[in-house]
Image (spheres, rainbow, N blue to C red):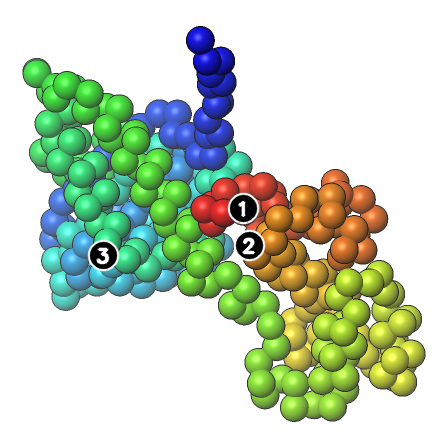
């Protein structure tokens, strides 16, 4: 008899509990003054637009096809724009997985190919919970008289699949976008020289003194000019270049985390993993899994 091995499935993102679900068309003058709670909230605009407000960012216009995530204990409010009668989907949930932190401070344009997951959650919810009347002050979901068999699990599974696909799509479409210098920023000879030196030495360990010696300018001047053009310090930007190189190696090679760490001159694999997570929100292993490698 053959010996079989049971593969333990890695759980990258797990929804622990669902708190509330809303799927409704709002009056054009709708206004909800705001709240904060110790769980996550996703707001998706199916039609029209709404105005989301947080203390961190103020008023933000959320357009059709966009979703925003409010992290636990973040105060937020919502209102219609006085013109449209928006149709929105809101779900609040408890999730302790590290991967969910990817959504902090992000507004995501959701590809239409993922709408079916939102619709599935909404339809399952209607047959499982009493959500037929929109109530922004809802604090507890009540089951309908004869809930749909497996409805709660289907809602959980669809939400997990939706969130994982949103992470994948953002990584694929926007990975590294805003991390590199724009063309007009490297027109300055000093900035170009610094940039070239960093990229040429991405596999080495260098200091700010090494950079200044290479471009023949003082440390204070290099730091000030580079920060002015990029918004980042020289070594911070160097680390970003290293992480972009690491992402490429993870996608296109079979090197281990330890090998990549050595190739990019990180002090230890543990420091490499911490730096990678700082700039991507994921460990190298999680990044590899999210990209289906």
**Please, what secondary structure does the residue beneath circle 3 have?**
helix
Mark 2 or mark 1: whose residue is earlier in sequence: 2
Where is residue 176 shown, x and y percent of the image? Answer: 54, 64
* Residue drawn at the location 58% of the way across and 41% of the way down: 285
In the image as oriented, which residue stretches furthest toward the top?
1
Question: Pointer 3 and pointer 1: residues touching (CB < 8 Å)?
Answer: no
Left/right placement of residue 216 relative to residue 23 reads right
Mark 2 or mark 3: whose residue is earlier in sequence: 3
Q: In the drawing, what numbered circle is on residue 251?
A: 2
Where is residue 220 shown, x and y percent of the image? Answer: 85, 76
Q: Quadrant of residue 211?
A: bottom right
Binning the other alpha carbons within 10 Å of mark 1 as few (below 14), some (14 to 19) or many (20 upward) gives: some
Question: Pointer 2 and pointer 1: residues touching (CB < 8 Å)?
Answer: yes
Q: What residue is pinned by disc 1? A: 288
State how far apart marks 2 and 1 are (Cα): 7 Å
Q: What residue is pinned by disc 3? A: 112
């Amino acid at each position: 008899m053959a010996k079989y091995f049971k593969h333990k499935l890695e759980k990258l993102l797990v929804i622990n509990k669902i708190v509330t679900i809303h799927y409704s068309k709002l009056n054009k003058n709708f206004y909800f003054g705001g709240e904060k709670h110790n769980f996550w909230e996703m707001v998706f605009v199916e039609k029209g637009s709404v105005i989301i407000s947080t203390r961190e960012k103020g008023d933000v216009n959320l357009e059709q096809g966009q979703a925003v995530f409010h992290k636990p204990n973040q105060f937020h409010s919502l209102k219609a724009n006085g013109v449209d009668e928006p149709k929105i989907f809101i779900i609040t949930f408890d999730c302790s997985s590290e991967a969910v932190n990817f959504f902090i401070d992000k507004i995501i344009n959701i590809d239409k190919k993922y709408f079916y997951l939102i619709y599935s959650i909404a339809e399952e919810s209607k047959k499982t919970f009493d959500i037929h009347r929109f109530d922004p002050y809802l604090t507890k979901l009540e089951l309908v008289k004869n809930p749909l068999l497996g409805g709660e699990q289907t809602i959980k599974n669809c939400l997990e699949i939706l969130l994982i696909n949103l992470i994948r799509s953002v990584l694929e479409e926007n990975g590294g976008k805003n991390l590199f210098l724009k063309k007009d920023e490297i027109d300055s000879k000093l900035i170009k020289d610094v940039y070239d030196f960093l990229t040429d030495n991405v596999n080495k360990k260098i200091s700010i003194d090494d950079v200044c010696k290479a471009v023949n300018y003082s440390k204070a001047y290099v730091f000030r000019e580079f920060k002015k053009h990029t918004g980042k310090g020289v070594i911070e930007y160097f680390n970003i270049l290293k992480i972009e190189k690491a992402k490429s190696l993870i996608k296109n090679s079979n090197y281990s985390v330890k090998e990549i760490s050595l190739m990019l001159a990180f002090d230890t694999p543990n420091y490499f993993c911490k730096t990678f997570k700082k700039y991507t929100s994921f460990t190298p292993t999680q990044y590899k899994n999210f990209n289906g490698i």
